Amino acid sequence: MSDETPRPPRRKRYGGKNPRRFEDKYKEHDPARYGETIAKVIASGKTPAGSHIPILVAEVLEALQLKFGMTGVDATLGYGGHAAKILEKIGPTGNLVGLDMDPLEISKTEARLRGLGFGVECFEAVRSNYAGIAKVLEERGTHEVDFIFADLGCSSMQFDDPARGFSYKSVGPLDMRMNPSRGLTAAEWLVRASVEKLETALHLNADEPRAESIAVALAGHRFANTTSLAQAIRESVRVSDEDERELTVRRVFQAIRIAVNEEFTALEAFLRVLPKCLKPGGRAAILTFHSGEDRRVKQAMRQGVRDGIFFEMSEGATVAGPEERRMNPRSSSAKLRWVTRA
Ligand SMILES: C[S@@+](CC[C@H](N)C(=O)[O-])C[C@H]1O[C@@H](n2cnc3c(N)ncnc32)[C@H](O)[C@@H]1O
């Protein structure tokens, strides 16, 4: 190369041996090239940056009773971990529609699944809220499918990317929207929230025991970023136990995220239309991660059994075993329930 030849721009270096910032973990963002690094990260009980480890995979596949040629919906496509396993089970003659409301991740996931060999004949990714599942199926001329799966909440890609504003552990814009092109950011939601509205959200969305005092401290305030909100929460909680203070921050973030994304409204709408989207004998399986989700799923399934809409329901909830919990701490709060359409 002569002196005049422009050199390609170099990747910005991070200081130190082990990158800490999400954007510096370039090896984890490129699993195809750095498989060994990814395996080491997973073995250490962490989720590689920009990916998501699917939870209770064998149990989900078993619950859905998948067979070659079946049609179904993965209502929460995420990274496509469950979807890839489902697609293997239903084979090239089967068909899976994957829904996700996150426009930033869905195209990457679609490309990843195509790269694994799942073509348009067996898989379609659709950007949609799962509350609209009936309309998505109607538009495709398939009113009923053999199975429906949902893995509720956020993906690790959303939680771990500071730019999405879900995490109190790193500084980022106070956003928290799974679909950033719709609705209020968490910062805007908090500025507009009355003390009563925030207190109710803290109670209903996260069973927060100090809802009243936290709501008085936060409602109507504008916070510059995720860490300034986290600090304000810590200052509003008068407890000496540091672990309890951090758990409070986590619960408050969860409550605000659920409110910003109207998660319970969407879940209730999804549970209402679910039966009419399933063929007789069809299975629905749902993974939940906290009491607000699990209560709604359990009640809807039980009511459906009482009304004769479902003829069978899982006995209790399936949870992750100790090995899965160790390898993937995010599986610790997961509960899996299923029903069969009458
Ligand atoms: C836990 S992740 C799913 C992970 C996925 N099972 C996997 O193996 O990669 C949940 C996903 O559901 C999406 N999601 C959450 N609420 C939704 C809704 N109401 N409608 C559609 N997608 C939703 C999120 O954007 C996220 O990508």
Image: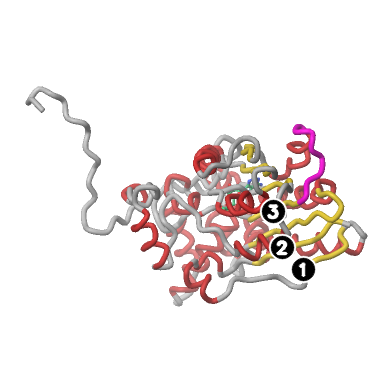
What amino acid type is highlighted by mark number 3? Phe
Query: What mark, if any, has residue 314 been given in the picture?
Result: 1
Q: Earlier in the sequence, mark 1 or mark 3?
A: 3
Question: What's the residue at 74%, 42% (across, down)?
Answer: 133
* Residue at 72% over, 54% down: 67
**How many numbered circles does the render carry?**
3
* Magenta region, residue range: 139-146
Q: Gap in Å between the C-alphas at discs 3 and 2? A: 10 Å
Within 10 Å of disc 3 (Cα), the crowding (few <14, some 14-19, many 20+) is: many
Q: Confirm whether residue 251 shows in the render.
A: yes
Q: Amino acid at mark 1?
A: Ser
- In which quadrant of the rendered image does the C terminus lie? bottom right
Q: Is 329 placed above or below 144 here? A: below
The residue closer to the viewer here, 40 or 258, is 40
At 65% across and 43% down in the image, what residue appears?
Answer: 92
Residue 111 magenta-drawn?
A: no
Q: Nearer the viewer, mark 2 or mark 1?
A: 2
Q: Which mark is residue 63?
A: 2
Which residue in the rendered view is the most extreme toward the left?
3
Q: Which residue is mark 3?
A: 149
x and y percent of residue 221 in the render? 51, 49
Q: Spatial distance from mark 1 to mark 3, Cα to Cα?
A: 14 Å
Q: Are dots 3 and 2 in contact, CB under 8 Å?
A: no
Query: Could you tell me the amino acid type at mark 2?
Result: Ala
Nearest to N terminus: mark 3 or mark 2: 2
Task: Return the x and y of residue 195 as percentages of the image width and height.
Answer: 62, 54
Is residue 10 found left or right of 49 in the rendered image?
left
Q: Earlier in the sequence, mark 2 or mark 1?
A: 2
Above or below, 277 relative to 340: above
